[in-house]
Amino acid sequence: ITVKGWSMKNDIHKKYAQLLIDIENHLEKSESLNLHFKYEDLNSASLRYLHIILNTLNGAHKQGKKIALFWNCMSDKEDQMIETGMELAKESKFRFQFSYL
């Protein structure tokens, strides 16, 4: 699953709710998940959803699922995105990998 671009719009609640459903559905059918985030920027509401997603992924990992999250930094706000990724990586109990595009 790949999520990319700007996460700043007002309709993010609907999009992240669907993303969480998609992740849960995928994990019901599969023993692994590779999740790629390629943000150019994100807002605080998006970050709250990322914490919820991390909790879901941590739970799946605890159940024996193979989880990998790839945090791709690709913008002029790269330092901020690296810092955000490092904060999220501290919470993860699974593979969390940084890449720079």
Image (cartoon, grey):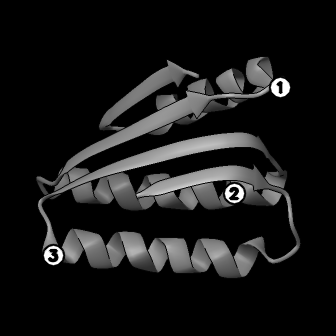
Question: How many residues crowd around disc 1 within 10 Å: few (fewer than 14), some, or many (20 or more)?
Answer: few
In the picture, the quarter occupied by the N terminus is bottom left
Residue 42, compared with residue 79, is above or below; it is below
Disc 2 is placed on an element classified as: helix
- Which residue has dot 2 on it? 48
- In the rendered structure, the answer to whether residue 20 lies left or right of residue 5 reads left
- Which residue has dot 3 on it? 29
Three-letter residue code for mark 2: Arg
In the picture, the quarter occupied by the C terminus is top right
Q: Mark 3 vs mark 2: which is more N-terminal?
A: 3
Q: Position of residue 19 (x, y in %)?
A: 51, 71
Disc 3 is placed on an element classified as: helix
Q: Position of residue 96 (x, y in %)?
A: 39, 31
Residue 71, compared with residue 47, is above or below; it is above
The reply to whether discs 3 and 2 touch (Cβ–Cβ < 8 Å) is no
Residue 38, compared with residue 83, is above or below; it is below
Tell me which corner region of the image, top left, top right, bottom left or bottom right, holds residue 46. Answer: bottom right
Per the model, the C-alpha gap separating discs 3 and 2 is 26 Å
Q: Mark 1 vs mark 2: which is more N-terminal?
A: 2
Per the model, the C-alpha gap separating discs 1 and 2 is 19 Å
Q: Position of residue 13 (x, y in %)?
A: 72, 76
Question: How many residues crowd around disc 3 within 10 Å: few (fewer than 14), some, or many (20 or more)?
Answer: few
Q: Position of residue 48 (x, y in %)?
A: 69, 57
- Which residue has dot 1 on it? 77
